[in-house]
Amino acid sequence: MTLVASTYIVALRYTRTVGTDLYFSTTAVCIAEVIKLILSLSILAKETGSLGRLMSSLKEHTLGSPKEMLKLSVPSLVYAVQNNMAFLALSNLDAAIYQVTYQLKIPCTALCMVFMLQRSLTRLQWFSVFMLCGGVTLVQWNPAQAVKVQIEQNPLLGFGAVAIAVLCSGFAGVYFEKVLKSSDTSLWVRNIQMYLSGIVVTLAGVVLSDGPQVLEKGFFYGYSPSVWFVVFLASVGGLYTSVVVKYTDNIMKGFSAAAAIVLSTIASVMLFGLQITPNFTVGSLLVCLSIYLYGLPRQDTTKIQPEASSQNLKEKLLVV
Ligand code: NCC
């Protein structure tokens, strides 16, 4: 997931800054939803085993479940905003700066989990969440990477887009996790429900933001092989994300992504002789320490009854 995500961000930035026939980013977000729907349908078809069963399952979970469809339209709308914001941000900010600022999604996701899933984090876990955020920022910090480009950029607009993307990522991720884990409906059915409304919402985005130009130049205007590569990564990355959230949770997604960033850099050092910077060393230590601290067993004081604990105290005092 992390390898796909890192490649995605760099490739996306490349397609927004190189070349003259700039494609409509809203169409790329929309096409990714269509591909994710097709892939999820194929996986569900494999799971159900026959076309008949696939059709009846689809009918039951889409046309037959308008309430569920409505529920899933919430994260699809929020993800549509987030995915469009990523394009806007990467049209105005360098990929490395985007990666670093986007790490704010880690504490934002933790906050959403506390409020929306009623999860509680100990003080130490909160501390480790912020330590992780700082660690990943340091690991990826390399101002020398910022490359000057010829296109006009508006960094303020870019940072505004990152802020919206951070909020959307935290909220939509936790909302989807809540819906997914509150019933035994299959992940692929949930994905299909979400991508169906995702297609409608992102298509509305195309019409509202680029309608007249798309009519004039065509939906696939400016689609070079590298743009198709970005669309492909967006689709595969989205499906990976849903699998990661199913088997772990959104905070673990943040932690595993961070660990993989460190591991992939170490692999680059061994394979390609990449130079390690002091920032990387300190950042990696912070990431490892935060993962260790987050996973420490909680000291559960809620199970101790007041009478029992005062009784314990009396016994201890007697011993003393
Ligand atoms: O920001 P992030 O994910 O939380 O965004 C989640 C992405 O996954 C898609 N999704 C989510 C749930 C679901 N059931 N199906 C999905 O298709 C959403 O549409 C959204 O695109 C991360 O944790 O850092 C991660 O980052 C993205 C991506 O790098 C950033 O959003 C870029 O701004 C990664 N996506 C890709 O690599 C394509 C994701 O894997 C991990």
Image: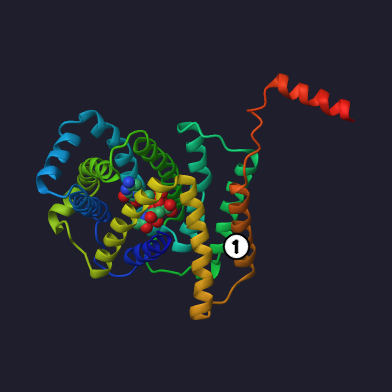
Say left or right for 309 vs 35: right
Residue 14, position as x, y percentages in the image: 35, 67
Disc 1 CB within 8 Å of nearest ligand 1 atom: no
In the displayed orientation, state which residue is furthest to the left.
52
Q: Residue at x 49, y 80 (%)?
A: 272
Query: Which secondary structure lies at badge 1?
Result: helix
Quadrant of the snapshot with the N terminus: bottom left
| Front-most of residues 190 and 269 | 190
Judge whether 174 appears above or below 51 on screen: above
| Front-most of residues 76 and 12 | 76
Q: Amino acid at mark 1?
A: Ser
Say left or right for 102 vs 46: right
Residue of label 1: 284
Residue 57, position as x, y percentages in the image: 17, 39
- Occupied quadrant, residue 283: bottom right
Say left or right for 127 vs 202: right
Q: Residue at x 28, y 66 (%)?
A: 229
- Occupied quadrant, residue 52: top left
Q: Residue at x 80, y 26 (%)?
A: 313
Residue 194, position as x, y percentages in the image: 26, 41
Quadrant of the snapshot with the C terminus: top right
Category of crowding for the residue at label 1, using alpha-carbon neighbours closer than 10 angstroms: few (below 14), some (14–19), many (at least 20): many
Judge whether 204 appears above or below 143 on screen: above
Judge whether 307 appears above or below 96 on screen: above
Can residue 241 be seen by looking at this rendering? yes
Can residue 89 be seen by looking at this rendering? no
Q: Say how the picture is coloured.
A: rainbow
